[in-house]
Image (spheres, helix red, strand yellow):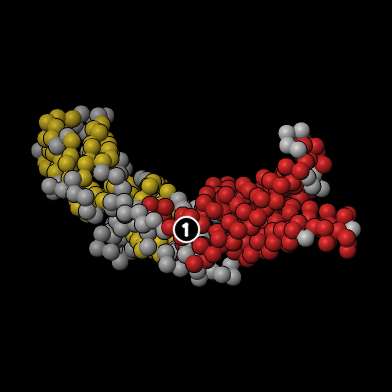
Amino acid sequence: MLNRIIIASLIVILSLSVASGFLTSLNPCSQCHRNISETCSFNQTSSSAVLPPQLSESATLITLPIDISGSGLNREYRINELTVTLTSVNGKITIQNTKQTWNNLYPGGKILFSSTITGIEEGTDTLIFTLSALNTHQYSTFSDSYTYDVDIVFKGVNTQKPAVEPSTRSLYLSEEQTTFQLFIQQDIHNLTLSSSDNIILEPTAIETLYKGDHVDVTVTVVSKKALEENLTITWSESSETQQLQLLVSFAPPPLEKINYYSLIGRILGILSLCLLIASIGLSGIHKKIRTYVNKVLAPKKRSRIHCYLSGILLFLSIIHGLLLLLGPYADFLTKSEIILGYITVISMGIVSINGTFRTIIINKTGSNLWRKIHGYCSYFALMLCIIHACLIGTEFAIIRSIF
């Protein structure tokens, strides 16, 4: 019977987890936390956007900023991974870098997705930007897309790359230091890198570089405040001076605000689950477990410990629920995952009453019925407790991410 209950619990967990995994939103945090707002979206109206409606030649830069914004945030709510993909619908536009990924991003800065069009064919085409991101807290999924039409008025292909090609067109720093690369496509002289006093670059100048070389550039942010600044790269090529710019965006980690309601409530929730498992193990309901435990503890002592654990468990479960319902889940009293918590406490209450008035109930109903009620309600409470924890518990987010 115990094995069947465990299998049924796993099936329910898998079903609910898979169903919830298809949900995408610009602000999925608001589904569980009304006071938390976090979004990842394209900003095509930004002054940094480079989206030419017409193309007359290739080697054209395409740039689209991504805003990561939010409020009510702490360290748990950063973006674990953000990926942007650019595709050509009609295939008339050849794109140099169609996919870019960023990691460990704090809201408050700007990312520039930049790519170069290296080949075109006369006609019309549609470019589609697609965004997907993953939050580290509840493993929530963000998504956005932007589509625009391009009129190609000149047929031609120019695959010549610039003499200096950076590994990225924008640097989003959540830490104070990072590194990117410069790839040298042709022989150049007098390479210099410059920015404001808020940023330290290493190296800042190289006299001569040859085709095939690469340069590791270390960027260190001196300022402790959020900033958006350009990093300028200049070099001489065939007696001509060339220049390109990279956007450096720094969003320092926000100060973590400790929510003691949430912290204590979560600790009590995990403790309640552990005590529930221990209480069932000491209850003597399952014959094989009872036989093993009786070898370690005398039956009377085992039963006494079981009763103490059950009382403490019920008390801690009620405090756990009250703390979280008064804190982060105050606006979600009827959310399905929380209703599972209510039913779990009710089931444990029935088990406690059944155990407290054991003699009276056995005299009226018999020991077999009493044992069945006590056992089934205990297993039912354990099953609901596990499902409740897996669906909403912060410490069980890794389980939700798997499905």
Could one spot residue 397 in this view of the protein? no
Mark 1 packing: few (<14 Cα in 10 Å), some, or many (20+)?
A: some
Residue 366 vertical position relative to residue 180 in the rendered view, above or below: below
Circle 1 is placed at which residue position? Answer: 262
Residue 162 shown left or right of residue 122 in the figure: left
Residue 221 shown left or right of residue 102 in the figure: left
Q: Please give the name of the residue rendered at 31% of the width and 48% of the height, measured from the top-left corner.
A: 174
Q: Please give the name of the residue rendered at 78% of the width and 60% of the height, measured from the top-left corner.
A: 357
Residue 220, position as x, y percentages in the image? 21, 41
Q: Secondary structure at mark 1?
A: helix
| Number of marks in the rendered image | 1
Q: Nearer the viewer, residue 349 or 266?
A: 349
Q: Amino acid at mark 1?
A: Ser
Q: Please give the name of the residue rendered at 57% of the width and 49% of the height, measured from the top-left corner.
A: 271
Residue 211 vertical position relative to residue 346 in the rendered view, above or below: above
Residue 356 shown left or right of residue 82 in the figure: right
Residue 165, position as x, y percentages in the image? 26, 40
Could one spot residue 355 in this view of the protein? yes
Image quadrant where residue 167 sits: top left
Residue 215, position as x, y percentages in the image? 23, 32
Q: Please give the name of the residue rendered at 46% of the width and 60% of the height, measured from the top-left corner.
A: 261
Q: Nearer the viewer, residue 226 or 91?
A: 226
Residue 168, position as x, y percentages in the image? 30, 44
Q: Nearer the viewer, residue 105 or 76?
A: 76
